[in-house]
Image (cartoon, rainbow, N blue to C red):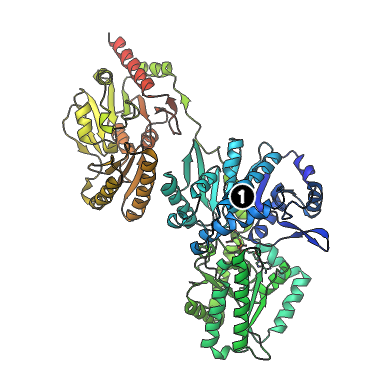
Amino acid sequence: MSPSASTEQPSPGRLVVVSNRLPVTLSQTNGEWEARASSGGLASAMEPILRQTGGLWIGWAGDDGELDPEQRASLLSSTAQDFAYIPVEFPPGAGEAFYKGYPNQTVWPLFHLFPARMNFDPPSWHDYVAGNEHFAATVAANLREGDLIWIHDYHLMLLPRMLREQDPAIKLGFFLHIPFPSSEAFAFLPRGDEVLLGLLGADLLAFHTHQHLQHFRSCLLRILAIESSMDSVEYQGRTIKLEALPIGIDPTGLASLIQHDPRTKERIEELRSQYADKHVIVAVDRLDYTKGIPERLHAFRTLMRQRPDLKEKVVMLQVAVPSREGIGEYQSLSSEINELVGEINGEFGTPQWTPVMYLRQSIERSSLAALYAVADVAWVTPLRDGMNLVAKEYCACKLNDDGVLVLSQFAGAAVEMGEALLVNPYDEEQVAAAVERALSMRPGERKRRMRHLRERVSRNDVFDWARRFLKSLAAVGLEQTPSAQALNVRAVEDAYKKASRRLLILDYDGTLVPIQDNPGNAVPPDALIRTLTRLAADPGNVVAVLSGRSADEMEDWLGAVPGLHLGAEHGALSRKAGTETWEHLVPTPGAMEWKAKMRSVFEHFVQRAPGSFVEEKEYSIVWHYRRVEPQFGHWLAAELAGLMEGLLAETDARPVLGRGIVEVRPVWVNKGLFASHLLAEEEPSLQLGAGDDSTDEDVFDRLGEHAWTIHVGTGRSRAQYWLKDTGAMLRLLDTLAATAEARAA
Ligand code: ADQ
């Protein structure tokens, strides 16, 4: 199918896959251009899915601008089967510059925790931006309404934002195939803030493991001061879903090669007879320093030294497909491996026996399946890996469940493959001992472990992975609560008139009074006091003002309004109308030892940021930085909140970023409790809740389905209605007060 033919097909919800490389590479042999399928985790994973679902795959074809667009399209269409390849056009040289620079010399080493191997050449950042722009242009030119866009991996982390800016309505998911580093490591990344903002253009961001996902969240907090929840982040009025989705493989495809493909069967027989009297250990990797090949060879040498009796009884087949050969790091890795293999074979080899068989090439899928099927042990010990498909492929090929997997604990795959022998690849002796154990493991244990591994690999296959990603992406928007509507004041007034018993729960700062630079200046104006007094005087009303402020402040400012209920410290404290005492709605904060420890950390931040100050309340401790230079203040706030996350991990307290504040308080203190408390005592026929920030959402959630929930100001909310600002809110309250008075008169 040609690219142009495919773009004419009317099928809404079409899948558009975007990755750096197309799974075909255009290259020249004897002056003739040809299209060749390329190896690599992504190609192995995506091809079967695209074949199943149809659609477009947009990516670079690797010819670096030497072919003209028609030649390229025609070569590519000769290889595509049930889907179309759309090549991204780069000016000559620009494709290589993009690929080899920032993604592979800066992001790749850092994300795999090799900061010492990270290189950053400032022009490479501009190539990265330009590269992502080329992709954005190609995607935009081929996009149809209703398409689902699925962007893959670290080369294209700016693309989600670029596409979102072109069309805010697109549905776009991003999957990161490599690990996401901790915020401490990520902080080294030059232009890391722009990378994070780039990713936030997506509707769905998925990672292989929860650890990667948590790292991403802590980077958002520490670097951009953006809070998130376990499975989502609110940004610029959109909800971005966050998911951990471990990739799988196509186990049935591999099994059918072993069972039905004559070439695979033949190769299995060859290998069996060649190594009839030997244990076969297999290792298959891309030639990359993250895969731990030299470390593995060192461990193999240790094993051979410790176990001379294994002489001529074991063979290690190391297959390594060259990759990124133009980058210096990779050339020196290749030489290092050659030397090590030579040394080991020289030290232990005999005329009849070569201990390490090193194949530096890409091998056919049929040969790969045969190798896995024959191998007694798979030795998969990357130093760090997003997932590692080799571990799963090996298990899928053990149709008789007879084989042992030795797996690095730093591969994403380790999370799901607990029956493997998990090792620290940096510990040569531990790894050698694990391989020794694998070689001597009794058949019963071997089979039991492998059966579980294989079942899981079969169940969580690549199709299931893709289905889950696409289901989640397709549901974006449908799951989100509809945006609030502008409040119709007449309608509230009518409902208010009809109701005999009414409950009004009003937030203070940002709802009844505008936000002030100095929080101490938010004194209630006389007009507000008068309105609240009029409302509270109506015997049909229960009126409560509920704030995050301390009980003392609430009392000073609003304590004299007759009949008004007060809530302080986000509802942990309540003062009923007509009483003078504050009641603790949640257990008294006696057990909050963390507060004393936090105080000294907060004070350190006060010293760093003149103008900021610490406020201590019964249930919380707050750092106020509204008077600090904003950029510096936000930067420190993010640092403080990130630090607190770690320090408080084992307590029930968490940092919350507010407007100009970082507040640490127990998770169980929230305004919803206060609302529930009032609802339990009253039986209102009308409920109204108003607030302006995220702490008020808990009130909206607790009030009944028919409540008038009002969000004051812009931004996302679960409230049913919105009002523009505090002025509009006061006018509404005035109107309601006047309604009641008119009726009484
Ligand atoms: P890769 O780093 O490429 O992928 P990996 O998951 O091991 O790593 O996938 C390699 C693939 O290439 C496997 O399917 C393997 O069979 C194949 N392969 C390797 N050597 C080969 C050879 N000599 N000949 C033929 N085929 C060979 C990235 C991330 C991983 C993540 C994948 C998928 O780095 O962590 O698992 O994406 O998300």
Q: In which quarter of the image is residue 142?
A: top right
* View extreme (top): residue: 745
Judged from the image, the quadrant occupied by ligand 1 is bottom right
Label 1 sits on a secondary structure element that is: helix
- Assign the C terminus to one quadrant of the image: top left
x, y percentage for residue 125?
A: 57, 50
x, y percentage for residue 67?
A: 78, 51
Q: Residue at x 59, y 58 (%)?
A: 104
Does 620 sit above or below residue 93? Answer: above
Q: Residues within 10 Å of mark 1 (few under 14, many from 20)?
A: many
x, y percentage for residue 323?
A: 65, 65
x, y percentage for residue 56?
A: 71, 47
Q: Which residue is drawn at 53% across and 66% down?
A: 417
Between 719 and 452, the one nearer to me in the picture: 719
Q: In which quarter of the image is residue 137?
A: top right
* In this picture, residue 52 sits left or right of residue 110: right
* View extreme (left): residue: 580
The residue that mark 1 highlights is 127
**Residue type at the position of mark 1:** Asp
Question: Is residue 441 at least partly visible in the picture?
Answer: no
* In this picture, residue 670 sits left or right of residue 4: left
Between 7 and 404, the one nearer to me in the picture: 7
Does 587 sit above or below residue 358? Answer: above
